[in-house]
Amino acid sequence: EDGILGEWQIAEDDEVKVGQSLVELSLSGAATDAMAQPAAEAAEPRALDASKTVAGLSPEAVQSLQGIIPATIEMTCRWGTVRNARLRSKQTPGGTLSTATMAAWAVLEAMRKHERFASVIRGNELRYDPERFDLGMAVALPGDALETAVVKHANQMEWQAFSVAFNDALRSARHGGVISKNRVPLSISSMGAYNVRSAIPIVVPPSVATLFIGAPYLLPDPQSTDGGTIEVASLVLTFDHRWINGVGAAAFLSDVRKGIERFDLV
């Protein structure tokens, strides 16, 4: 703004201190009016509504991560069998089945064979209930929020009942349904819709492991003589090393891979 310089407060060659007044300044009317106006209040930071689902892990989940010793292994799995089974399912009265449903069944079958992957963390203990365990599946929600669909009593189900319950659980989670995860030893995660081939999942207690299933992609077929390819997907397993060692994790993941590669229920 315009103003009028008045008398200098310092002489030539004077040493000037920080913040010292150098010259008198008389402001014009407009500037004086502007100075008289109170400064606009700064906008207060907007707090997110804690009652709404927000992106990222909940404070409870972050706190439960303390003490975990995560370890990760990865295997490559042939994907052609479940892909072909999905195509065959289109001709069945029950409608098209997703490859995710078939892969989840393979995970459930492996959990039945490996007790530690069917156990949940309770404080400083790993507990196995032979009567019941559930299966989780990560579900993306609007706003980068995350929920876990839960198939309850998964260990008691046969294939037909499981395929229905799995899709019902996904649908419920996408519509805001929230189910307890206290009996979920393992959750499955995938970002195939975004063509993510590999990722390192985290484990959130009471679960003891999380399995990431990557988007399928093509590799050269080592058995082909004419440059053929095979469709594969990465299976990435993160587990709590306090309760499971690498050999046990490898055996479990190998059974998951076999279940996917040999799926024959459609």
Image (cartoon, helix red, strand yellow):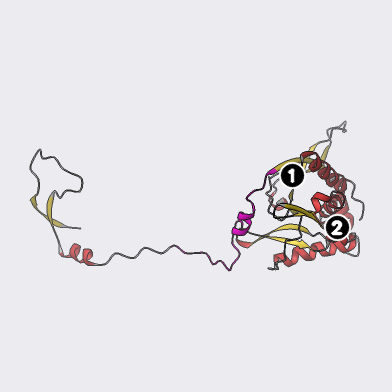
Q: Considering the image in quadrants, where does the N terminus appear? A: bottom left
Q: Is residue 12 above or below residue 226?
A: below
In-front residue for pair 166/142:
166
Q: Position of residue 265 (x, y in %)?
A: 92, 55
* Amino acid type, residue under disc 2 in the picture: Pro
Q: Residues within 10 Å of mark 2 (few under 14, many from 20)?
A: few
Q: Residues within 10 Å of mark 1 (few under 14, many from 20)?
A: many
Q: Is residue 189 visible?
A: no
Q: Position of residue 71 (x, y in %)?
A: 70, 42
Dominant SS in magenta: loop
Q: Position of residue 246 (x, y in %)?
A: 77, 39
Under circle 2, the secondary element is: loop
Name the residue tied to disc 2.
130
Q: Position of residue 94 (x, y in %)?
A: 88, 64
Q: Earlier in the sequence, mark 1 or mark 2?
A: 2
Under circle 1, the secondary element is: strand
Residue at position x 77%, y 41% in the image: 245
In-front residue for pair 87/32:
32
Write down the quadrant of residue 232 in the picture: top right
* Amino acid type, residue under disc 1 in the picture: Val
Label 1 to label 2: alpha-carbon separation: 26 Å
Q: Is residue 66 above or below residue 145?
A: above
The disc at residue 236 is: 1
Judged from this view, the residue extending furthest toward the top is: 225
Which segment is the magenta one?
Answer: 45-70
As drawn, is 240 to the left or to the right of 83? left
